[in-house]
Image (cartoon, helix red, strand yellow):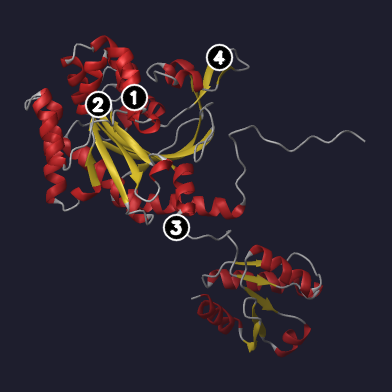
Amino acid sequence: MSELIEPRIPKGFRDFLPERETRRLALLHSLGLVFERFGYAPIDTPVLEFAEVLLGKGGGDTDKEVYRFTDHGGRDVAMRYDLTVPFARFMAAHIAELPLPFRRWHAAKAWRGENTQRGRYREFMQVDFDVVGTDAASADLEILLLMRETLNALGMDRSKVHVGHRGVFNAFVGSLGLEKSSVEVLRTIDKRRKVGDDKTAEMLAALAGDEKARRILAFTGIEGTMAATLAKMRETVGAKDPGIMRLEELARCLEELGCADRFVLDPSITRGLDYYTGIVFETFLLDLPDIGSVCSGGRYNDLASLYTKQSLPGVGASIGIDRLMAAMEELNLGGGGAGAPAVLVLFLEEALLGRYHGFAQALRAAGLAAEVYPEKKKLAVQFAYAEKRGTPLALVYGADEAAAGTVGLKDLRSRESYDGLSLPEAAAKARELLR
């Protein structure tokens, strides 16, 4: 007998059992409904891209984390590490077929060979939503409002969107004469929430000296109100700075809409990827601040320039579904369920097989999920199966019911039986019991 192969999977990858996958699909469905209300269209792109497409503008540590290899045809390919860079390639390839501005949403897996931690894996699912083809403040505002609406739809209204601006931050770094170190400074600030102020100050001092490190920390701090933080930023880089003017317009609109309390102007939000050029944002849960951002993104006006000469400014956000699900589980949000049917049609007589499937079809037509137990076994076995599946009701039809021209319905939770019913009566009773 040959040796069995151990059924294992690599670190950072996971199987999803029915209960968890059902929750994930329900979450994606809820998000999709919100995107549709905002007029966003779904798209998809390949898992594999040419390496030069993916790595042309990723930058930083991302290149080291990409799953990259030579395929059987000798081509240098890589698995997508996010959904933004493939989207830029998608827009350049299909620009003549799409209306501008173009609103999209995309739910798909991505892969990064990074260290695993709570809510972070090497294979993960993201949901991205973007507006491409305009640099207008309206698009920035719409993405912020959509971020708020998606979290509300998932019951996560106790959240704050922290908003910064890459252009303003770059102008501030330039005023310190640190243009050559701007990327290192930016990435150091991007890690501030993870490593703390003391370690950040130490790393900044090594890059720019103690005095400039102190000024960077002061600039990136949050003041008591959005207006106070904006005033500090305005004083530092000037009222005519385009980024300051954009932040002022957004702040005014959020106040007008009565939702400014869900947003925090946070100059420390810079985002580590090189392609961001304007507004940037991260979202934190008030009840789980340590889990990190569950929805992040920003404006990327030059990303598609790698693939087309046509200007395609864009702004968008990405929701980390795995991290979001981990948070929802900790907060007991989103319910459960394993995709179990509401009714199990019991298999009591071999000769009634066709009738059982007819009953199941009729129940489904009445709006009830139903399945047929596949073979004749003891009732205890069939009841145990229903309990393990989480199915609450059983339809009973044996020789006695066939002779009487009726069916029975059994509530497996209360053990109560309802006999002598017609099939429509059984369906109505099932809906009543499931309320």
Per the model, the C-alpha gap separating discs 3 and 1 is 34 Å
Q: Nearer the viewer, mark 4 or mark 3?
A: 3
Residue, far right:
1
Q: Nearer the viewer, mark 4 or mark 1?
A: 1
Q: Nearer the viewer, mark 2 or mark 3?
A: 2
Per the model, the C-alpha gap separating discs 4 and 1 is 41 Å
**Quadrant of the rendered image containing residue 179:** top left
Q: Are marks 4 and 3 in contact (CB under 8 Å)?
A: no
- In the rendered view, tell whether residue 264 sits above or below residue 219: below
Q: Which residue is mark 2?
A: 217
Amino acid tagged 4: Arg
- In the rendered view, tell whether residue 431 sits above or below residue 20: below
Q: Position of residue 233 (x, y in %)?
A: 14, 29
Q: Which residue is mark 4?
A: 75
Q: Residues within 10 Å of mark 3 (few under 14, many from 20)?
A: few
Q: Are marks 2 and 1 in contact (CB under 8 Å)?
A: yes
Q: Which residue is mark 1?
A: 200
On screen, residue 269 versus residue 413, left or right, reads: left
Task: Give the residue displayed 44% in from the left and 46% down from the top.
Answer: 324
Amino acid tagged 1: Thr
Amino acid tagged 3: Leu
Task: Give the residue displayed 34% in from the left and 27% down from the top.
Answer: 198
Q: Which residue is mark 3?
A: 333
**Element type at mark 2:** helix
Q: Residues within 10 Å of mark 1 (few under 14, many from 20)?
A: many
On screen, residue 32 versus residue 64, left or right, reads: left
